[in-house]
Amino acid sequence: MTIRCIAFDLDDTLWECQPVIERAEARYYAWLQSVYPKICEKYSAEELVEHRMSFMRTLPEYRHNLTYLRKHWMKSLMDEFGYDYDQIDAGFDVFWLARNEVTFYDGSLENLQSLATRYSLGVISNGNADVHHIGVGHLFDFVISSEKAGVAKPHADIFHQALKLANVAKHEAVYVGDDPERDIVGAQQAGMKAIWFNPKLKPWPGGLAPYAVIQHLDELEDIITRI
C-alpha cells in the first residue's frame, strides 16, 4: 500500500494549544478593559471565560464554527451592558491574532518541511488557527476547518471532504492527531488510518485503536513507509 497524503490536526499536534489560548484570552481581556470597562468591572478574566463557555453550550448546532460562536457571545456581552456592536470585529481580531502566535513543538516544523517534499500534506482542524497567517501554509496542499466543512471532527464528512480536496482514496491517506475521539476514532471511522500523536504516552482510553502511536513527528515517516 502506498501512502500519498498525510493530514494533520493542529492544536496539540503541531504546537501546544493551552498557552496560546491563555495568552489570547488575556490579550482580549486587556482590550476589553480599555474599550468596554463596565464588562471587566463585573467579570474577572476567569469568570469571562466561563461566561463564554456557558454561552457556547447553548448553541450546540454551531459547535463547528468557533468564530461565529465567539462573535455572537461578544454580541451578548454588548447587549448585557448596553454597548453597541461597532467594535465586535476589532475585538475578535485581538483574540484571533494572538491565537495564531504559536510555537511549534521542537523539530515539528523541520519534519513538515521534509515530509512536504515527498507527500501531499493537509490540515483537518476543528479550530480557527490559520496556517497561512502563521506562515506555513505553503507546506500544505489543502486546509479544511470545521467551519468550512460545516461539521466538526469526529464527523466522517470532514474527513471525506479532505480526501476529496487531496484527490486521494482513503487507503492512500493517513491522519495524525492528538485527540483519541475526534482525531483517531473519527479518522478511522471515515476509513483512514490514524496515527496518535501522544508525546506523554497516555493510556489509550478505548474505542477504535490507532494504527500507530508516536511521541514526535520524526517517527512518522518510518511508520508510513511500512504501511
Image (cartoon, rainbow, N blue to C red):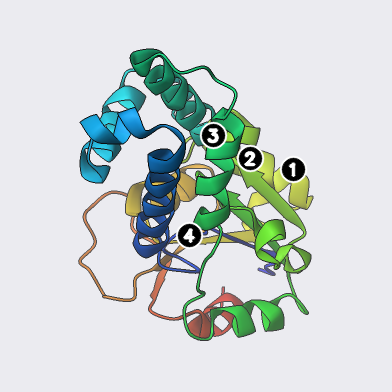
Cα distance in 3D space between marks 2 and 1:
6 Å
Indicate the position of residue 53 as horizontal and vertical percent values.
Answer: 30, 32
Estimate the spatial distance between the alpha carbons at disc 2 and disc 3, rounded to whole Å.
23 Å
Tell me the element at label 3. Answer: helix
The residue shown at (54%, 79%) is 108
Q: CA distance from mark 2 to mark 4?
A: 14 Å
For numbered disc 4, what is the local secondary structure?
strand
Q: Earlier in the sequence, mark 4 or mark 1?
A: 1
Q: In terms of sequence position, does the residue under pointer 2 or pointer 3 come before the other? A: 3
**Front label number (1 vs 3):** 3
Query: Observer-nearest residue: 150 or 58?
Result: 58
Name the foreground residue: 11 vs 24: 24
Secondary structure of the residue carrying tag 2 is helix
**Amino acid on which disc 2 is placed:** His
The spot of residue 133 in percent (x, y) is 69, 58
Where, by quadrant of the figure, is residue 136 drawn?
bottom right
Mark 2 crowd level (few <14, some 14–19, many ≥20, 10 Å Cα) = some
Q: Residue at x 27, y 44 (%)?
A: 45
- Quarter in which the N terminus is drawn: bottom right
Q: Say which of 213 and 146 sits in front.
A: 146
Judge whether residue 49 can be spotted in this image. yes
- Pointer 3: what residue? 67
* Mark 1, secondary structure of its residue: helix
From the image, tell me which residue sits under label 2. Answer: 160
Q: CA distance from mark 1 to mark 3?
A: 25 Å
Asked if residue 37 is positioned above or below residue 118 in the image, the reply reads: above
Q: Which residue is mark 1?
A: 164
- Residue at image position (39%, 48%) is 30
Q: Dot 1 surroundings within 10 Å: few (below 14), some, or many (20 or more)?
A: few
User: Quick check: can you spot residue 172?
Assistant: no
